Image: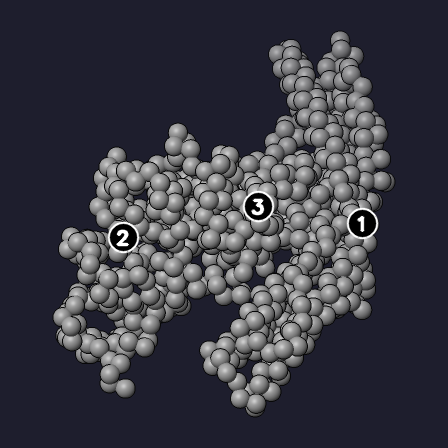
Amino acid sequence: MSSYLRGSTNYVWSTTSILGKGATATVHQGVNKVNGEPVAVKTFNHISTLRPQEIQIREFEVLQKVNHENIVKLLAIEEEQENRGKVIVMELCTGGSLFNILDDPENTYGLEESEFLLVLEHLYAGMKHLRDNNLIHRDLKPGNIMKFIRDDGTTVYKLTDFGAARELQEGQHFQSLYGTEEYLHPDMYERAVLRKHANKTFGATIDLWSIGVTLYHVATGNLPFRPYGGRRNKETMHYITTRKESGVISGIQTKENGPIEWKRELPSNCQLSYGLKKIITPLLAGLLEADHRKIWTFDRFFKEVEVVLSRKCIDIFHVNEARLIKIYILPDETYQNLREYISEQTNIKDTSQILIYQNDLFLNIIEEYTRAEGYPTTKKEEPIFLFNRDDNNISITTDLELPKFTDFMTVISVENDAAQAKFACSIGHQCKRHIERYSLYSKLIFDTVDNFTKYSNLELKQLHQNTQHLLDKTLLMKKMAGVLALSQQISNYGRKCEFPERLESISKEFATEAAKGVTNLHKSNCVENTLKLQWDSMSRDLKCPYKTLAPARAKTQVEHLRDSWQHLVRDRATRTLSYNDEQFHILERIKITQTINRLKILLEKEVFPQYEQLAENFGDWYKIAQNIHLKMGILRSDVNAFENKLRDFEEELTIDNLDYSEHIKNNLDKVKNSNVSKRNSSSTQNQKLKTCINNYKKESEDIRKIMRENTELLNQLNKSTSELGALNISHGNVNQHG
């Protein structure tokens, strides 16, 4: 066993524990002799020694120059004890390479959205550090991006393998050839692979093409440019990359000498949402530009990625289609921009959108001009709910498409069986994602009912309170108008007071129709909770796949698939099977077929039908809910209209009251200035006036309790009216005596 061990001063590694292998070097897993810390050790073979000395030491110099979280950390450069060759000791990235991650059947159609964005963010940061130090990588690809898992379980992606890296100032060029065929810029591919234009030079931007191919691979699980036959069809590969139009991000040839299928969009089966595809596609188009007049600079790339990463993701449940959408909004954009993005994805006019978040209108949580960076953070499990005020129909789309799984061949082939098992795992993961999606949508249907019901009840409570307040205010206005009319009648005021009749005319319809409608609606939904009870009744006999743990069951089945796949992979490594091993091999093939069938049955016979039935019943309930919302809107308009009328009436009443008070004051001054020596009162008139004043005082006291702002005015009116009556009587007596 010791013959497999190699060591340097501080580290030891096993030659059989290989993490990666290239043309000139091999990376092994090793440990620190002192503390047992696991490390990665890069050793070089004899081919590497054939390179010029300055090329051999270049990787050491580059690693010593860089220091960044998104670049694999250099721990030491030491000499191997046996052959005295240099070895590079680096931190160990236990998550493996991005190439191996993409090769896993879980990622056949690319990484899921949040992981893709993490790769983009870390690749951008690592490359920016390189360019800040005037370095180019020259061999960017998923195989040279490692996944490092921190102690807290979070992931960091790191650039590695700087064997081809070198210093290159902006505007400088080089001639040497490095890289991997599928990720090479067309100019370098032409010279390195097709052996043409031997004197052609290249600039730093050749890394941008490799980044574009890498990002496409990460997003879709496939390379963007694929001639029929792969690497052996080199001329067609060059044709695809050089003849494509600007904006085209993939070219695929599916049969020998067949046409090229050009695409300007990412494939529908990749895991990125429409919202992210829309902003990633222009980025890929810019990176995969072969026209020298349109090729991006690194500065342009960095700026574009910064804009992408600055966007805030808003999760929205599109109620009318019972599905989730994602909106990526810029930090300085506002509510109107959000509505425009929503309209673009759903065709719901911005004026027809109702957005509810956590049982309230989203616009009640944020201001209309609040910047998006200040919006609350949503999750797919806790999204904003989008309703269409003009449409109460629920229409779902069916997306159950899965690759067809063909049965294993009768004859055992360890090579073919392992490949077939891997394909089965890929189908299993896709099936699991469908199950998880429809299960989540089913849960969100229930959440929609809960949010809409609570929002409607809150709105109805507020509307009912406003209505009651207006009814109370109307009663107060009636009393005030009655007192004013009586006062004016007693004081022989010239104008006739018509306020009581006008108020009766204004308020009668409101009290008998709108207010009654609000009361009934409030009682039905807030007190009796009819809307929620209707849904409970309609959904009582329905099953929700989220509640029956369908996603967990799918996960278990996929784990069984992966176990069987790994069994067949081990059989492939064995090559020759014993009779007993062959029987177990056959058993694993049977298990794979049965597990795939169980997963499909779970999706097609249980989860989707349950989601479909829930959506159908929800559609019936939603029509009822929309009707209530419509009634509430009409009643709110009636209440607002009456409130405006009552406000206008109150203003007119106040103005007339002020005019009347001014009239009383002027008459009082005139009478006071007349030299009246004595004031005797006529008992009959005094008694009448006294009764009026007492009634007025009583009514004024009631008004004072509710509308304190009118107290002083009414007191003044009371006093003035009394004095004027007394003076008029006295003046009449004087005249009689005269």
Q: Quadrant of the C terminus?
A: top right
Q: What percent of the width, then of the height, locates residue 147?
A: 38, 63
Front label number (1 vs 2): 2
Front label number (3 vs 1): 3
Residues tagged 2 and 3 counted as in contact (Cβ below 8 A): no
Q: What percent of the width, then of the height, locates residue 535?
A: 78, 60
Residue at left 56%, top 53%?
A: 270
Residues 288 and 651: in front is 288
Q: What percent of the width, then of the height, locates residue 15?
A: 28, 76
Q: Earlier in the sequence, mark 2 or mark 3?
A: 2
Q: In the figure, 451 relative to 80: above or below?
A: above
How would you rate the neighbour count of disc 1 (Cα within 10 Å): few for under 14, some for 14-19, many for 20 or more?
A: some
Q: In the figure, 517 relative to 154: above or below?
A: above
What residue did someone put label 1 on? 623
For the question of whether residue 587 can be seen, the reply is: yes
Kindly report the distance in space between the C-alpha atoms of the residues bearing marks 1 and 2: 64 Å
Residues 410 and 548: in front is 410
For residue 412, which quarter of the picture? Answer: bottom right
Kindly report the distance in space between the C-alpha atoms of the residues bearing marks 3 and 1: 56 Å
Residues 255 and 417: in front is 255
Q: Quadrant of the N terminus?
A: bottom left
Task: Say which amino acid is labelled 2.
Answer: Ala
Numbered label attached to residue 257: 3
Task: Say which amino acid is labelled 1.
Answer: Lys
Residue at left 72%, top 48%?
A: 320
Helix, strand or loop at mark 1: helix
What residue did someone put label 2 on? 164
Q: Earlier in the sequence, mark 1 or mark 2?
A: 2
326 displayed left or right of 456: left
Kindly report the distance in space between the C-alpha atoms of the residues bearing marks 2 and 3: 35 Å
Residue at left 51%, top 56%?
A: 221
344 displayed left or right of 49: right
